[in-house]
Structure formats: C-alpha cells, structure tokens
Image: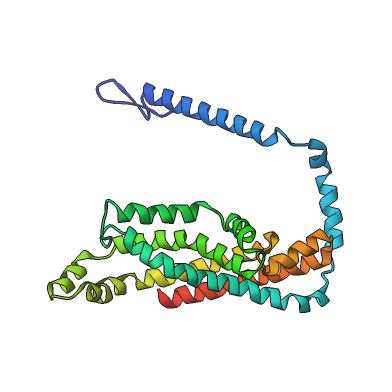
Amino acid sequence: MPVLQSATGRSWQHRSGRQRLIAWFGWLALVALVVFAWQVMTRDTIWAFVADAPRQAADIGERMFPPRWGYMERLWQPLWDTLNIATLGTLLALFVAVPVAFLAARNTTPSVRFVRPAALLLIVASRSINSLIWALLLVSILGPGLLAGILAIALRSIGFIGKLLYEAIEEIDASQVEAVAATGASGAQVLDYAIAPQIMPAFAGITVFRWDINIRESTVLGLVGAGGIGLELSHSLNTLAWPQVTLIFIVILGTVVLSEWVSARVRHAII
C-alpha cells in the first residue's frame, strides 16, 4: 500500500480505511459466491464419470476418423435447407422488426406512454427466448419441418434487429430531421429524406450480422425436428455413426466460416 508523507506531516494513502473495508468485504462476497456456485455446479456430478472422461473422449475420437466422405451427397439438400432457414428467417424478421423499431424509438414513436412500452415488450420477449426453444414450441404446434425452423429464427431475430435498430434511430442527427420538416415535408418525406439515409448503414450492418448469427443457429435447429443439416446430425448421433458426425461437423464449420467471410466483406463494403 503506497504511503506518502506530505509537508504537513500527514500521510496520504490510496484508499481510506472505509474504502479498504468495503473492498475487503467485496472480495469476501466474491469468494463466497464462487464457493456457492462451485457447490451448485458439482452437487450432482458423478466424479467417476469425470475421471473416465478422457478415455471415453479418446475412444469416440478414434471412431470419428476418418470422415465418411461418401456421405456428402446426402448433405447437400440439408445444407441448402439450413441456408434457406437462416435467410428466410432473417427476411421475415425484418418485416416485423423495422416497424417495431420505429415504434420503440423515442423520436419516432407515436406515443411514448403506450406504443413505445408495447414495442419494447415485444423486443424483450423475442430476445429472452432462445431460437432452440422457439423451435421446440413451433415443432409441437406446426409439426417438424422447415417452416418451424424459419419461424423460430424469425421470432428470435425480431428482438435483436429491433433493439439495435431503434437505438440507431434514437442516435440520428435531429437537426437534419428539423431541416427537412421545416420545408413543409410530410411525415413520409421526412422519413425518406432525413431518417432513412442516416440509419441505412446501421440497418445493413445489423441485417448482415444477424444473418451470420442465424447461419450458426439454424445448424442446430434440426436437433429438435426443425429441419436442416441439424436433422442429419441428430440421426447420425442417434445411430452412433461417428464418421458421419465428423463430416457434418466439417460441413458446418465450413459453412460458418464462409458466412463469416461473406458478412465481413459486406460490412466492409457498407462501412
């Protein structure tokens, strides 16, 4: 603890006695929280399985190689379905998220007291439920298939796009809006000439970024029956066809890397 002697004879310390006591209690609470979390995490752990995990992992790893490359001909259609789930789900979300974002933004909502809270509630509800849970619910309602996957991706994406977009709307330069409105422009013209040009870069970046995320999420929706390459992964796991699992992992990795490259290029071109 650094202590300096001043000209008046009084010493200077980095923290006062009260601050040191608060910091000490803070560290004590953090240690107690870590101990409690560890107890909760390991309460139902069977340590015999944990000790045997390296051997089991090595055994599965041996079974997974080499990949069954001939199985690739059966993956093209599921892979195409996965891309369609991500793309159509993103587009469907845009049709809902854009109006919701304008209703949620303080500077464009028709009612701060009533309409804005309702729009924010929709955004929060969408973001609070994972796409896999949406898929479980929709498969139960609509049955297995691509439609459930597309709607699950859309319902999850509405909150993400809506939140980022309404924040971008609230950050626009109000002077440009006032200048266009002062010319006697209508509300639609103000939106077209003052608001839209300011948010278009953010809108494009958000859309591409969400599409990139949806590529990742759509690869696992098949595990609950929502179609795509995840369905083939589920079948291969259930039948312990480990060489097929390896090939599916390679295909998913390649797809995600390609989508990341595409989204990065698009964002770079926009920005």
* Residue 62 visible, this angle: yes
Q: Quadrant of the C terminus?
A: bottom left
The total number of labels drawn is 0
Horizontal side of 93 relative to 41 (left or right) equals left
Horizontal side of 254 relative to 10 (left or right) equals right
Q: Quadrant of the N terminus?
A: top left
Q: Where is residue 145? Give x, y as percent.
A: 66, 68
Residue found 65% across the figure and 77% down from its top: 80
* Residue 260 visible, this angle: no
Horizontal side of 134 relative to 106 (left or right) equals right
Q: Where is residue 246? Give x, y as percent.
A: 78, 66
The foreground one among 164 and 6 is 164
Residue found 77% across the figure and 69% down from its top: 247
Task: Report the coloring of the rendering.
Answer: rainbow
The foreground one among 140 and 158 is 140
Residue found 60% across the figure and 69% down from its top: 147
- Examine the image and state in which quarter residue 75 appears: bottom right
- Examine the image and state in which quarter residue 195 appears: bottom left
Q: Where is residue 237? Give x, y as percent.
A: 79, 60
Horizontal side of 79 relative to 63 (left or right) equals left
The foreground one among 265 and 146 is 146
Q: Where is residue 35? Give x, y as percent.
A: 61, 30
Residue found 35% across the figure and 61% down from its top: 166
The foreground one among 68 and 140 is 140
